[in-house]
Amino acid sequence: MSCCDLAAAGQLGKAGIMASDCEPALNQAESRNPTLERYLGALREAKNDSEQFAALLLVTKAVKAGDIDAKTRRRIFDAVGFTFPNRLLTTKEAPDGCPDHVLRALGVALLACFCSDPELAAHPQVLNKIPILSTFLTARGDPDDAARRSMIDDTYQCLTAVAGTPRGPRHLIAGGTVSALCQAYLGHGYGFDQALALLVGLLAAAETQCWKEAEPDLLAVLRGLSEDFQKAEDASKFELCQLLPLFLPPTTVPSECLRDLQAGLARILGSKLSSWQRNPALKLAARLAHACGSDWIPVGNSGSKFLALLVNLACVEVRLALEETGTEVKEDVVTACYALMELGIQECTRCEQSLLKEPQKVQLVSIMKEAIGAVIHYLLQYTRTPNRSSLFGSTSRIVSCTCMYRPVPEPGKGAGLLVPGLWRGSANSSQVGPEKQKEPFVFASVRILGAWLAEETSSLRKEVCQLLPFLVRYAKTLYEEAEEANDLSQQVATLAISPTAPGPTWPGDALRLLLPGWCHLTVEDGPREILIKEGAPSLLCKYFLQQWELTSPGHDTSVLPDSVEIGLQTCCHIFLNLVVTAPGLIKRDACFTSLMNTLMTSLPSLVQQPGRLLLAANVATLGLLMARLLSTSPALQGTPASRGFFAAAILFLSQSHVARATPGSDQAVLVLSPDYEGIWADLQELWFLGMQAFTGCVPLLPWLAPAALRSRWPQELLQLLASVSPNSVKPEMVAAYQGVLVELARANRLCREAMRLQAGEETASHYRMAALEQCLSEP
């Protein structure tokens, strides 16, 4: 058989491919095409390759591209099978005068015909050809050779068909297809546009696996796309805006790519554009913000103007989308704008090395306030709670929320911003059914509001109070559903909407997002009353206990997201505020008794764990303050748990400072111990509160003073003060130490005697501790 005959036989694949698009109604091929039946019989009875070649040629003459349906294709496959195409793909000997690739082209054409059947596309005999097919994409040859071009088209047909099967993307990635597609695209040879399209599909289906298998090649494609984007002057730059988010790596983005991407976005967003041109650029900027925080924006005047422009455009888009009742919301675009607003919030609250100047910050805060008002307006449709603004009052802040809201980044990523999903569909503001509250866009709206409230609660007070009942119910609903699903890992994970569709419902940890704002709101009378009335304290106790389970010895805390510990600390701050401002609630609500029991049993092991001192400080201080209010509880009457808790609390309080010798001086000075020194700015307020709370517990718990004496804390404290220069001890430290020593001395005669033996009166005189000196002078 001649080379021309082989090429003609290859047209069978073309017939199959085209037929997969047309699918004519030929369901009774036997009666309508008896010639085809004879040739299929000859194909089945062929005894060697020559006979099969001849039969294939006859089959191609008997069928037309539009006269073959799925049933007929399957019958052709049954006649040919995989053995013949396998030999065609691997043979190294071709007929005289026939290029080697023609045989392979025929084999690929047959596979392309078979792959038009989804069942055959997932067949092991097709899947094991993936490595061979991948090599065809990068094989060198005459670019004008029609047979070679046909083979490349058929190869893409096969790979695309495999990608459309349930497990196809995984097999393609394992077979080296991603690297081959990258090289094919970068080579810009025939079919490179098909390579890019298939790459996009694989990244959308299995982004993590793609990057794991072919990171260098994908980065090379990203560099090429970024450079094209920076240089583009036509409509292609808007198309690239849609492609580039998929090619941003889960690790570090190369700096040269960031420069090109920022330059290209600056040109686009700095121009007057229609929405279809601007929206892809906003979504790309949001993905960059997720990947890199603000590191992709250059420092200096140009960078600050660009960032201000980004946030400004995002706020305008949010207001236009959410303020008009009855209009459809482009959820993917607005979610991207939320991410850019969140970046703006972070930069406006950054004190050091901020990209923004103070006038820009003032202006952006005002603009973002209006956009947040639109978000509240959108969320208010989910609650019919009457206006409770009359409840507002003000109090001085008791405990500040020192853990500023910073979503924890994934490894190698930036600030952990909300990433716009590529889900399609829109929200109608008139639809307020309960099922809609579980949609990702509502969650995204709650998230950006939480980011705002974490930093700013003084503005929009009336609107925030109106929305608080909904926020409590919303957070409770998601918490309870997640608890029922036993999906704790998803609940504590850093929120990031992936580039693929998240599904119809998307449970998330809304409480974690709202905690910092609630921490601020619990020090104000009006919001606190609303939160209490809606059951927020009980919900927070349950949430705290649930999250605490993740830190227990049975779990691997080395892989625990930092967001869990940050959430626990913020819960402690909220409870501290409630202890001070609503002590009656602590005494009457049974959930706080359960919380106290957990604190008592957990602190002894927590203070021993390296790197968790700040959490231990929160737990110790909260437990001490609650113990004053719950002192009559049986659990605090010298039980093993209560003794263990106070021993651990004493350990935390007593190890904060040490004596350090100074050159050229006879006396040492009082300094922070190494473990406390690096975090004292965050720890200081908790330590002083803890000292004050411990002092208050001593007269309420008669067994506590003897226990403190057995720990030798009062003796060691006096010894420490005697060994350092009084000038090195700050007045507030002297007051804190004196408070503890005085109460211990008053509560127990043995404590007084031990202090006297430790030269307590003399030390008290040196430090002008008049109350302690008087107490020790009494019998």
Image (spheres, rainbow, N blue to C red):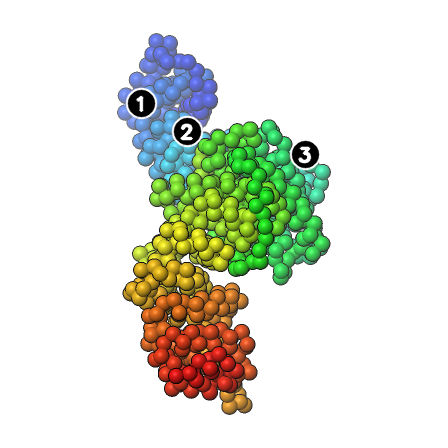
Ranked by sequence position, the earlier of labels 1 and 2 is 1
> For the residues carrying marks 1 and 2, which lies nearer the camera in this image?
2
Residue at the image position 42 percent from the left and 74 percent from the top? 743
Whole-percent x and y of residue 319?
Answer: 64, 38
Residue at left offset 56%, top offset 44%: 465
According to the picture, the residue beneath numbered tag 1 turns out to be 79
Give the structural element (helix, strand or loop) at label 2: helix
Q: Quadrant of residue 104?
A: top left
- Select label 3 or label 2 by which is in front: 3
Under tag 3, what secondary structure? loop
Identify residue for label 2: 112
Q: Residue at x 33, y 20 (%)?
A: 75
Mark 3 vs 1, N-terminal side: 1
Give the spatial CA distance, label 3 vs label 2: 42 Å
Q: Nearer the viewer, residue 116 or 638?
A: 638
Question: Label 2 neighbourhood size at 10 Å, few (<14), some (14-19), many (20+)?
Answer: many
Circle number at residue 603: none
Q: Marks 2 and 1: in contact by CB < 8 Å? A: no
Q: Report the residue marked by disc 3.
A: 274
| Whole-number angstrom distance, CA of label 1 to CA of label 2 | 16 Å
